[in-house]
Amino acid sequence: MALSPAGDAPQDVPAAVPQAPASAGRGLLPLLFTGNTAMYALYLGVGGVLLPLQVEHLDPAAKVANLGLISGVAAIFATFFNPFAGALSDRSGRRNPWILGGGLAAVATMALLGSVNSVLLVCIAWCLGQAAMNFYQAALTSVVPDRVPPARRGTASAAVGLGLPIGSTLGVLLASAFSDRLRTGYLVLGLLVALAAVLFSGLARERPLPAKRAVPLREQAAAFLGVLREPDFRWAFIGRALLVLGYFAVVGYQLYILQDHIDLPGGLSPERAIAILTPVSSAAMAVSTVVGGVLSDRLDRRKLFIGLSAALSAVALLIPVLSPTWPGMIVFSAVNGLAFGCFMAVDTALVTMVLPKAEDAARDMGVLNIANAGPQIIAPFVASAVVGLGGYTPLFLLAAALAVAGALAVKPIRGVR
């Protein structure tokens, strides 16, 4: 999964090469939106609904620990596999074949995931699914710098960004509809990605790019350590990592929270509850992403909005502790969506303003992705340990503390107001 799932940041791609006008025209933006929507639908539908249900069916008593293990191992696999997938598409100079291949492979891996019947096999199958999706994702992420002129990249990024709230809603709704037919649910989400891949590769024409030189591992490590030596960038990195860790520690266990911690009304299943909560959170996230970004531009204040959104997230995380009820979860989802959407929009703007060198912007934004992907690796292990020791109340309290720490981390940044 990602804040994208692990690896959701721009890849270290070749310099943009002008494409045919049709490739950079308006027709590309709906295809980018469709491709990203399908991707997030699979990630959130599987990670948020189908996978927890499958794990619970296999071993109800150990569901928390098993889900943490599977999610953590898959996140580690995806984090290390994503650069490999991106490097292959870079070296080929093509994106469409990798998008198509990854999309078609998603169907096969989802079919496998729906048919296995042990925790070990579920873990292996989900790692294979992550591999297929990383080929798809790495190539799709590279399309904007490859084919979109700089003057239109803001609009293109908006089309990509809207895929998260809409895709997550679609994925959870579809997964919830097939909660009693898991194999069919997996296949539907896989077919959705395959359809998007066929549409994109068939309609978005591309001109092959020059093959990219392979960068030695030692150079990559030196560049990584170099950018983190910059104080402003380092504090931004830490702030992002802390808030993302708290967010995914809770979101990854939402189904079990609804099962074991929240007093749901009679007749409302946890699967149906997620199908209601996800659109609420996604709508709030979409609104705050736009509003927060625009207001922070107009007021020329970034740290203020980051602090307020992180504080709001901490308040939201206390709601299920004080009111473990269905109305409380609805309020939590709305408020937390508002907070997280605003934080991510404004924090991304802040990071672009503290990059050490403009010529290394793509590489340094890739370093920032570790602040997205790393916490998603750690979150399942942390959450399962906390829940195993003390239940879900300590998990909410820990996530709230991490949100506050994330806000405090950006305070020392000097280059941005």
Image (tube, grey):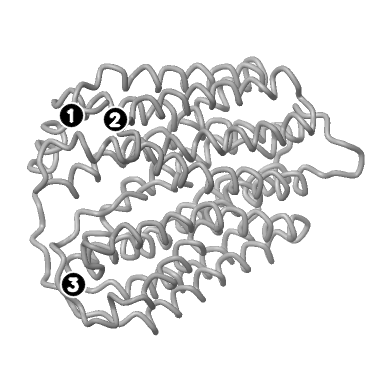
> Mark 1 and mark 2: span between their CA atoms?
8 Å
Helix, strand or loop under label 3: loop
**Of circles 3 and 2, which is in front?**
2
Task: Residue 127: give x, y in percent of width and height.
Answer: 46, 52
Residue type, numbered disc 3: Gly
**Mark 1 touching mark 2, by CB under 8 A?**
yes
User: Which residue is at 37% across, 30% downward?
Assistant: 241
> Percent from the top left, x then y, of residue 70?
53, 41
Residue at 10%, 57% in the rendered image: 214
Say the numbered circle drawn on residue 237: 2
Query: Does the CB distance between marks 3 and 2 fall below 8 Å?
Result: no
Judge left or right: residue 232 versus residue 310: left
Q: Which label belongs to residue 252?
A: none
Circle 1 sits on which residue?
A: 228
Q: Secondary structure at mark 2?
A: helix
What whole-number distance in Å separates the C-alpha atoms at marks 3 and 2?
31 Å
Mark 1, Cα crowd under 10 Å, few <14 / some 14-19 / many 20+, is some
The residue that disc 3 covers is: 93
Amino acid carrying label 2: it is Phe
- Residue at screen point 56% across, 63% down: 110
Residue with the most extreme right position: 266
